Amino acid sequence: MSEFKLSVVIPVYNEVRTLEEIVQRVRAVNINKEIIIVDDGSTDGSRQVEEKLAQLPDVQVYYHERNMGKGAAVRTALQHVTGDAVIIQDADLEYDPRDYHIMLQPFFEGKAKVVYGSRFLGGPRRAMMFWHMVANKFLTFVTNILYDTILSDMETCYKLFATDVIRSIPLHARGFELEPEITAKVLKRGHRIYEVPISYAGREYHEGKKIKGRDAFIAIWTLLKYRLVD
């Protein structure tokens, strides 16, 4: 374990209020790691924060000249990872990096190469918006039917992969359809997903939450599409 390295991928779009804090929280976790930030065309001052963060020895920053979506930012970051495992970390404060140890335990024990942190397995959480919760549960239900699994939280941000697994999957998503695309392709390749409970402090739209209701319909289409094609 002493030689293990975790690659933390952080897609950023207009997160100037929380970016520096989340990077500090990630850096505080006692794991050998690299932090790969991809700025997805921010216009709110995030880039000025990133220029300062780029001076840190464990942080790399890459830029999209225009906003292309979360999926595109993650795909760019994956080109630069050098760790043994990869975890996706949103740039807000909804997910707590202290949960990395919980996420990594099944990986270190050899139980799974793909681990999801579930917001619905009993971990502490700030009350979610009701319809947002309903959409999450419905999309997970559709996933379970189409891909013969029993996930509790397909749409979670906290997804951890062995690097060889995530690099073997051709990804095309540009936006939030990244979550169903990754899940569909992981399951179609025979990787059973191990879930662990995590904490969650969901934010409201006035606080900067970006996913919209229309993204649920895109997610359903993505799940159906990759059930039929790869």
Image: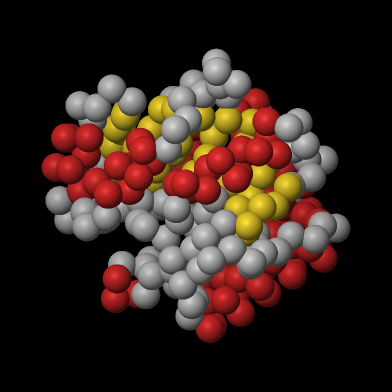
* Residue at point 35%, 56% (across, down): 92
112 shown above or below 128: above
* Residue at point 35%, 51% (across, down): 91
* Residue at point 27%, 55% (across, down): 18
Residue 41's spot in the image, x, y percent? 27, 48
Residue 129's spot in the image, x, y percent? 48, 80
Determine whether, in the image, residue 139 is placed left or right of residue 61: right
Determine whether, in the image, residue 161 is placed left or right of residue 45: right
Q: In terms of depth relative to the viewer, which is nearer, 165 or 72?
A: 165
153 shown above or below 47: below
One can see residue 73 in this view: no
Determine whether, in the image, residue 73 is placed left or right of residue 200: left
Q: In terms of depth relative to the viewer, which is nearer, 160 or 182?
A: 160
Residue 113's spot in the image, x, y percent? 71, 35
Find residue 51 and report its image quarter.
top left
One can see residue 176 in this view: yes
172 shown above or below 223: above
Pick out the residue farthest to the right.
Answer: 148
Pick out the residue farthest to the bottom.
Answer: 130
* Quarter of the C terminus within the rendering: top right
* Quarter of the N terminus within the rendering: top right
138 shown above or below 52: below
Residue 164's spot in the image, x, y percent? 65, 26
Find residue 212 and report its image quarter.
bottom left
